[in-house]
Image (cartoon, rainbow, N blue to C red):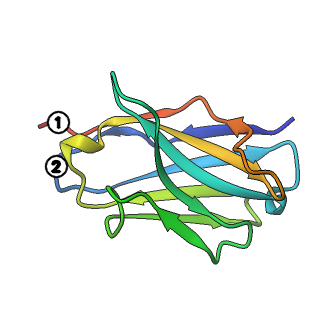
Amino acid sequence: QVQLVEFGGGSVQAGGSLRISCTFSGDTFTNYAMGWFRQAPGREREFVATVSSSGVGTMYGDSVRDRFTISRDNPESMTFLQMNSLKPEDTAVYYCAARRLGIDEYNFWGQGTEVTVPS
């Protein structure tokens, strides 16, 4: 069974940077595309970014494009989200998710890590 564990969240001033990480275990990491999603209080879950199994292909949500960078370290089975120029509206719980190749849905999720950007 795939297990995902996020860490690295915290509180950071507006305009600052933060990197959150996700560890993967329980299967072959390179068989999965990885994604980051977030959910703010009272709002629906929002797509943030995804990275292909090789790490070459990436996609971003409109609200984070040009500020956030997703990456992965395949030998270490880890996924990262570098967040720059943080804004108060980036405040949310950030979730790591895994999507097995050939399947459309993200079928494994972490427990989330909280990021707070005070206004």
Is 58 located above or below residue 3 in the figure?
below
Q: Earlier in the sequence, mark 1 or mark 2?
A: 2
> Does residue 115 appear in the picture of this structure?
no
Secondary structure of the residue carrying numbered label 1: loop
Q: Residue at x 64, y 78 (%)?
A: 56
Q: Is residue 76 visible?
A: yes
Say which mark, if any, is on residue 14.
2
Q: Pinpoint residue 80: horizontal percent, then vertical percent.
A: 54, 57
Does the CB distance between marks 1 and 2 fall below 8 Å? Answer: yes
Residue in view at x 57 percent, y 40 percent: 6
Q: Quadrant of the C terminus?
A: top left
Q: Is residue 87 left or right of residue 95?
A: left
* Extreme-bottom residue of the structure: 56
Residue 118 appears in which quarter of the rendering?
top left
Residue 53, percent from left and from top: 74, 66
In the displayed structure, does residue 110 sit left or right of residue 24? Answer: left
Which amino acid, by three-letter code, is at mark 1?
A: Pro
